[in-house]
């Protein structure tokens, strides 16, 4: 079974916990820590490890299943899907472009920073 490293979870009070767990799993897929066909902890195991209600973890697993990132082998557990990397990469890029980049660009504008200067080879 793949180690999800739940000890590293520090929750932000401004974001739903199930979404923070989802983000952490997405991050571990993008980093290559979780690979296709890796088994992830059961809902109860994961909930106990990070100190959250199993229903919260179940909500995360349901969302990941809907996205196609994980799948359930009845009686065996949850596994990372074959195309999880592509799914997470696409959704993460879309989220960055739609939500994070505009905030960053606005901040750069307020600070008088030119993106060309930041990304030029010096």
Image (spheres, grey):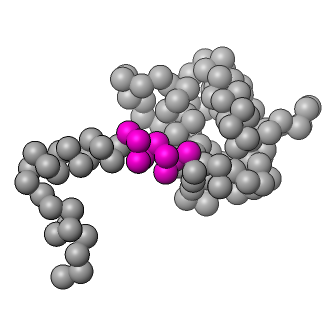
Give the residue drawn at x 73%, y 34%.
65
Q: Is residue 120 above or below residue 65?
A: below
38 sits left or right of 59 in the view: right
Q: Nearer the viewer, residue 39 or 60?
A: 60
Is 79 placed above or below 75 here? below
Q: Quadrant of residue 82?
A: bottom right
**Picture coordinates of residue 76, whole percent (x, y):** 89, 37
**How many labels were placed on the picture?**
0
Q: Is residue 32 magenta?
A: no
Looking at the image, which residue is at 69% across and 50% down?
84
Residue 87 placed where, x, y %?
65, 49
The answer to whether one can see residue 111 in this image is yes
Q: Residue at x 66, y 30 (%)?
A: 63
Residue sitting at x 48%, y 37% = 9
Specify the principal SS of the magenta part.
helix
Is residue 8 visible to the viewer in this orientation of the structure? Answer: no
Please say if 61 is above or below 84.
above
Residues rendered magenta in the picture:
91-99
Residue 110 falls in image quadrant: top left
The image shows residue 109 at horizontal and vertical percentages of 14, 49
Which one is nearer the viewer's eye here, 63 or 75? Answer: 63
The C terminus, quarter of image: bottom left
Q: Residue furthest right?
A: 75
- In the displayed structure, does residue 73 sit left or right of residue 99? right
Q: Is residue 97 magenta?
A: yes
Give residue 59's position: percent from left, percent from top: 65, 23
């Amino acid at each position: 079974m793949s180690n999800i490293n739940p000890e590293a979870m520090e929750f932000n009070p401004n974001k739903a916990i199930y979404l923070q767990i989802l983000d952490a799993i997405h991050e571990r897929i993008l980093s290559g820590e979780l690979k296709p066909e890796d088994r992830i902890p059961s809902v109860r195991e994961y909930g106990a490890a990070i100190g959250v209600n199993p229903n919260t973890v179940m909500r995360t697993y349901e969302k990941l299943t809907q996205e196609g990132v994980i799948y359930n082998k009845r009686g065996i557990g949850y596994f990372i899907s074959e195309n999880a990397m592509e799914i997470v990469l696409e959704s993460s890029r879309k989220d960055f472009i739609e939500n994070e980049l505009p905030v960053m660009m606005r901040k750069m504008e307020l600070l008088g920073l030119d993106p060309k200067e930041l990304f030029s080879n010096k």
